[in-house]
Image (cartoon, rainbow, N blue to C red):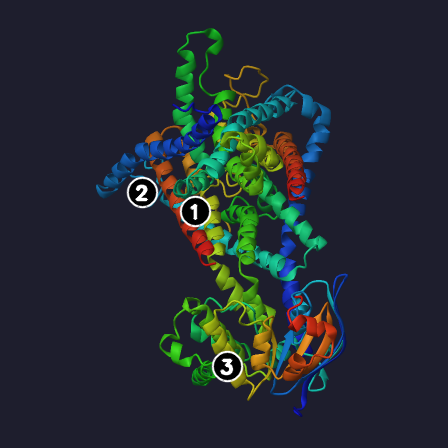
Amino acid sequence: MLREKGKERIYEIFFLLIASLSIVCVLVICVFLFGQGIPAMQKIGLFDFLTGTTWNPANESNPSFGIFPMILGSIYITAGAIIVGVPIGVLTAIFMTKYCPDHFYKFLKPVVDLMAGIPSIIYGFFGMTVMVPFIRDFFNGFGIKALQTNGLSIFTASLLLGFMILPTVINLSESAIRAVPDFYYEGSRALGATHEKAVFQVVLPAAKSGVLASVVLGIGRAIGETMAVIMVAGNQARITTNILSGIRTLTANVVIEMAYAADLHKEALIATGVVLFVFILIINLCFSIVKRKVGN
Amino acid sequence: MKKLNPLKFLVYAAAFFTIAVVVYIIGYILYKGAPQIVTEISNYMQGEYSLFDYKYSSKNVSLVPSVINTLIMIVISLGISTVLGVSTAIYLVEYAKTGNKFVEIIRITSETLSGIPSIIYGLFGMIFFVTYVGLGFSLISGILTVAIMILPLIIRSTEEALKAVPMSYREASFGLGAAKLRTIWVIILPSAMNGVLAGIILAIGRVIGETAALLYTSGTTTQVATNFMESGGRTLSVHMYMLTSEGTHFEQAYATAAILLLVVVLINALSYVLAKRLTKGR
Amino acid sequence: MDNKIKFEMKDVNLYYGDFHALKNVNLAVPEKEITAFIGPSGCGKSTLLKSLNRMNDLVEGCKITGDFLLDGEDIYDKRMDINKLRKRVGMVFQKPNPFPMSIYDNIAYGPRTHGIKNKTELDGIVEEALKNAAIWDECKDRLKKSALGMSGGQQQRLCIARALAVQPEILLMDEPTSALDPISTSKIEDLAIELKEKYTIVIVTHNMQQATRISDQTAFFLLGEVVEMNQTEKLFSMPQDKRTEDYITGRFG
């Protein structure tokens, strides 16, 4: 009898051990990334590394490792993606919950899920072969010097990333809107509000924490995106305010140069990854805080 | 006539735009890729250089080795993360008590894992598996990296599938004097199978589409990784990326993209059907 | 009514967290009779029933004190094998809950759990259990079909058969007819009366007519206490306690 109980206990401990593996994974990832990245930051100098405006690792005698342009690049493109993706995503989520007939929802929902499943390399390829030439021809068509672009630009990358975060924004916003109790809408209608008024002035504000969570997660997706971005962003490590010119993100910096980097250069690339990782951890933290607020 | 509400217009426009983006991307890739697939098949039949030749050369840029590598990667990485992920979910749903601090920590870490972008996994895989563990640029380095990456996905989908199994099944089984493990194994897991499978299939999709995490772990070499513990090899997505960045075989890149996209669409459809059966079974 | 006592509860107290769900309950369940627990919802009758095969162990924060003596043996003793206990004390739930498998596998699940693998032996057990639950004729031709395709009443009898297949000594029934139509209900009631030849039955019901129709003993619960326990006829014809009288005459509840 006791043996039976002991066996059950062993199974439980077995499952417990496996479950704790994901904790181990996070720990090991942190230890190894920080362990490899921090020494480089020390060698370069944390301040110089983060705020240095020149990235020139190839200079033999006096290489410079300033990733400020890439930090800006990531922020620009992420901000652009949010400007594009959030309004479209939230409005689409409103459509799916409050406007869409049932039979059409059955088609739309899998389409959105499919959108999340399309690999970034495909998005990137599409951006490269369709969006880049289109944007080049479109802006050059004005014949104005200030609008000249080769198509590989902050604008293109923002647009493409805006598309790519749509499923994230849509799915989270959708569940946030669905979580709003029906009587909000019904109560508002009963007071004589139109469908639009009820949805936009009562239901949507009630779902705002969830919508905010979707934005935060969208930011995380956009800032971490790599393959699609390097195919359309031009990847020049420079500071610019012209959204029709190219720029390099943190992610692009790692992928493009890792193939041939060595020594301090390689360590600096890993450190670039660490900076990105810190961004991601902060965003994740924001996400869980916002989500917890939704839970309450 | 009733005036069109501008908000209503915006809502419809946004939904239309979302659908248009998906349809355009898929339509465009297939439109450009499908004819090339046909050409490559006919080349193969006629013994000319073809994307479908068994061996890669810079003339045929064959995708066959990369498909084989992808299959090896799927089988092993899914094998690892299914065992780990399903077991973790079983612990979280069937064993852990609510409000348990430990469970809270596992949830947070698994959420963290799912928020980490693939490039970070790639870096980690390179530092840890390739260099520290000493596996080198090999398929196994990529496999292990990807296995960690899809772990949270499997945990989450399995968790949801287990939670969807009615409490009454558990009660009935315990009421007959069945032990916990038997109840989980014979009653709960089979009832949750569709949901678990839907998650696994989605994870397969993730592996097939992955690029950034693999460039510096399993690498970009073009051969079949016959010995996956030692030799590296590119997967289909990596192959696709290399074709576009080399820029010399654009037609073949379209064909590869079309094949990749078709596989992804198929996988999503399959997962969707399974997940739907899960909700219908209730 | 001089059957021997099968199950005895002494000074039972049960808490869900801070909530005191059962207060000083003392009850005796005689062998091979039907004992009914009645009372308004939330009075603790189902809670007590679930303590008899330790299903309450699954509820977090549930604390139990007092003695539960099955044939004189304390079922909450540390050395008690909970799975063997549940084999002896079977249970039928409020809503029919067949497993999503074939009729045959539903019945065979219990015996297989307890180590019976032999095909002919299992066949025999399945047939007998289904016959005992008076459902053999309705399903003997579709044993391999899913149990989920049966009607609610059939499913509930299947669940009774499933409970019988592990050869329990006691059968606990938790409002077994509350989800069923009148015809299915009367079938289950007839079945319960037949089954008491071989089994000790404890049934929770909110339906007083049901208690009078089938039970030998009735215990009336209110706010976690047993107000009164007596032979069913006596309890309903001359209740000793004012509260019992109020309840059975429909003044509250």
Q: Is residue B112 above or below residue C116?
A: above
Is the same chain shared between marks 2 and 1?
yes
Picture coordinates of residue B231 (x, y %)?
48, 47
Give the amino acid type for the residue marked by disc 3 in the picture: Leu
Q: What chain is tagged by disc 2?
A: B
The chain letter for the residue carrying disc 1 is: B
List the residue tagged with mark 2.
B52
> For mark 3, what is the residue?
C191
Query: Is the residue B160 above or below the residue C211 in the image?
Result: above
The chain letter for the residue carrying disc 3 is C
- The CA distance from mark 1 to mark 3 is 60 Å
Do marks 1 and 3 both belong to one polypeptide chain? no
Name the residue furthest left. Answer: B46
Q: Residue at x 59, y 40 (%)?
A: B116
Q: Establish if C91 lies above or below A183.
A: below
The one of B207 and B221 positioned closer to us in this rendering: B207
For label 1, the residue is: B70
Q: Position of residue B177 (x, y in %)?
A: 59, 75
Marks 1 & 3, CB-CB < 8 Å contact? no
Label 2 to label 1: alpha-carbon separation: 15 Å
Crowding around mark 3 (Cα neighbors within 10 Å: few <14, some 14 to 19, many 20+) is some
